[in-house]
Image (tube, rainbow, N blue to C red):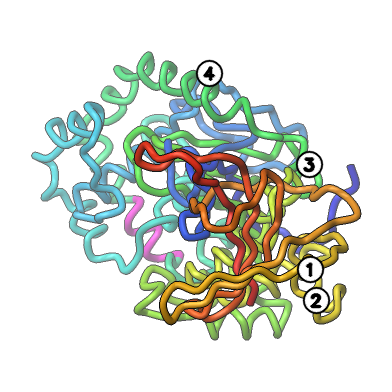
Amino acid sequence: MKKRHFTVSMGVCIIFFACLFGCTAPKQLIKSGASHTDFTSAVNAISEPDASLETTVNMPKQDTSNMVDERFELLSLVFRLAGREEYSDVSTGYQQTLVSEFVKYKELDAVTYAANLPLGYDAVFKLSVHMRKEGEQFALIDDIDSLVEDGRWTRQSAANFLKLLNDFYAETGFAAFYQSNLDFYKAETQLFIDNTYSGIDLEWFGAYVEPDNLRCVYSPSSTRNNYGATVNDTIVYCAVSGNGGASTHRQWYQENPEFKKWCDATIDPVKLPSYGNGQIIAGEYVTRAYDTLYYVEHGYVPAQLLFAEKRNGFPYIEEVYGLITPYEKAKAGDDKIKRILGVGYTMGDEQSLLIGSREIRWQVLSFTEPLPFLFVQTEVGHIFGSNTGDVLYVEDTWESSPFLLIDLGGAGLQGKDGFRGYSRISIE
């Protein structure tokens, strides 16, 4: 498969939909995770040094017997004790054990230092994959440019924290705790593989990265977020939380002035408080664009996905998606419906319904070929008299813009008959 030529700085995660669109917003996949779901190749058994971090050739494939990474579990614990909300879940027995076993160490210097660091979320995972095991302690890999590039970690803060982290590791006996839970980690890994990982189209990622450079980390200590990280454009990591999730990271922030402008213009401390600068947002944009591409190439409608990302606070997602695909707003001219559905159509006769001062008008579309997409039910209704497979163009005086409804068949509603399930797509 020919590689697509883009500057690579990417953490790959794959998503399973619990429900793709509520009011059209895609939920990130099978929550056994956070931004997202599953992945590709691997993580070495954590008690051994990950020497593969220092080479780009002859990379071993992932050992999938245990995807629970000691480095990330250790860091997640420290940030849990430091009070970071994104690492604080206690919904499982394992998480409760972490609290009961280690809460007595919350005053150690590593925890205090972590509590004062102006970072969290994926920055924690990013540090973990820039560490390697040396005997009974951890050290930074030789080249940490990709760790410090976005400014959250500096060489000094990483070095200072790592010294305290090693003291924490020794004093708490975390190595013994990790080893004592190996059977649990292996069992959880197998469940993750059976329920999620085995269903991923791993070949798809071969267009972007060498398969043997992919690593998947499964974390039972976290049930909230999923993260991606790349070690110097070579080794691509995805962290999947104990609920599942997905995403993909690449960045052109330093290379494309237009892309940089979009990212900087998206900074919003109210809507996106966790994305403090344009470079972090750049990773999110490209992650979301490639997530969209994955689903589009597996049958979903790009317009649905892109509209959902706009609602999530990323107004330039359509432009970013256009950077990685032939997708162009202009290719269908001003015909937004053709751009959304990808096929030609004709409009049927207009029908209408008055409900007090509200007027709803609709037309059934006819197509020269079947729609090549999958659709997810987002609402139910019974006023249109439509049949399974009908696509309706709807204008409603209570709505600010027209929308499409795709009839997915009969849908029960509170025991009533005659209701239809629809997939709704807004037309902007």
Q: Amino acid at mark 3?
A: Gly
Disc 1 to disc 4, C-alpha distance? 45 Å
Residue tagged by mark 2?
Answer: 335
Q: Residues within 10 Å of mark 4 (few under 14, many from 20)?
A: some
Tell me if label 1 and label 2 are in contact, CB under 8 Å.
yes
- Foreground residue among 176 and 206: 206
Q: Secondary structure at mark 3?
A: helix
Q: Which mark is residue 65?
A: 4
296 relative position to 405: left or right:
right
Numbered disc total? 4
Disc 4 to disc 2, C-alpha distance? 51 Å
Disc 4 versus disc 2: nearer the observer: 2
Q: Residues within 10 Å of mark 1 (few under 14, many from 20)?
A: some
- Foreground residue among 39 and 244: 244
Disc 2 versus disc 3: nearer the observer: 2
Q: Which comes sooner in the sequence, label 3 or label 4?
A: 4
Residue tagged by mark 1?
Answer: 339
* Residue 278 percent location from the top left of the image: 53, 77
Segment tinted magenta in the rendering: 155-162
Q: Which comes sooner in the sequence, label 1 or label 4?
A: 4
Q: Which mark is residue 206?
A: 3
Q: Which comes sooner in the sequence, label 2 or label 3?
A: 3
Q: Amino acid at mark 2?
A: Asp
Q: Secondary structure at mark 1?
A: helix
